Amino acid sequence: NQNKVRKLIIEQKLASNFIFIELTARGYEVVKSSANWIMLNLENDVDIVFELLLEQKIEVFRPTNVLLSGWLRISTPNMKKMKYLLFFFDKIMKELQNPKL
């Protein structure tokens, strides 16, 4: 059904725009895609953030190309999942910035 596909595309674009704006506002380098994902530069924190997001069942991919070291590819299917991602991402980054002794 074309209307269902259009609705899914609109939802995905809203989610992509939302997460782009939120992560950029937090000072991260983010690259948008015309597909259903974004690229997020986390530099030295990429490995731990990747593992912790995977534990939360968030759709992330760690590119293997050396030119993309420090980057994560994050799927942006809908707003609910992006708000879920942002909640855990903020929690993870806060912990990394202020580790408990």
Image: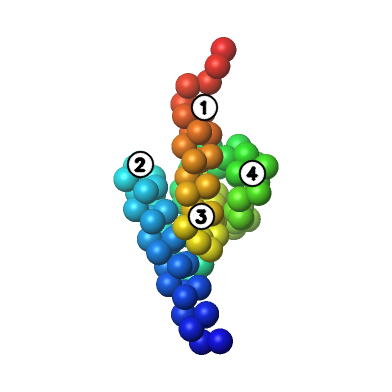
In the image, is 56 to the left or to the right of 32? right
**Residue at mark 4:** 56
Q: What residue is shown with label 3? A: 80
Front: mark 1 or 3: 3
Q: Earlier in the sequence, mark 4 or mark 3?
A: 4
Mark 2 or mark 4: name the one nearer the start of the chain.
2
Q: How far is disc 4 from disc 3 in space, using C-alphas?
A: 14 Å
Q: Residue at x 49, y 41 (%)?
A: 87
The amino acid pointed to by label 3 is Lys
Q: Residue farthest to the left? A: 25
As displayed, is residue 5 above or below residue 16? below
Residue type pointed to by label 4: Gln
Q: Which residue is mark 1?
A: 95
Location of the N terminus by quadrant is bottom right
Q: Secondary structure at mark 1?
A: helix
**Left or right: 21 with respect to 80?**
left
Identify the residue at image location x=47%, y=45%.
86
The answer to whether the residues at label 4 and label 3 have Cβ atoms under 8 Å apart is: no
**Which SS class for mark 3?**
helix
Which mark is first along the chain, 3 or 2? 2
Report the amino acid beneath label 2: Arg
Give the class, few, some or many, for how many residues have Cα within 10 Å of label 1's Cα (few <14, many ≥20): few
**Residue 11 is drawn in which quadrant?**
bottom left
Q: CA distance from mark 4 to mark 1?
A: 16 Å
Q: Which residue is mark 2?
A: 26
Q: Can you tell which of label 4 and label 1 is closer to the viewer?
A: 4
Residue 72 at x, y percent in the picture: 54, 52
Say which label, 1 or 2, has the lower sequence index: 2
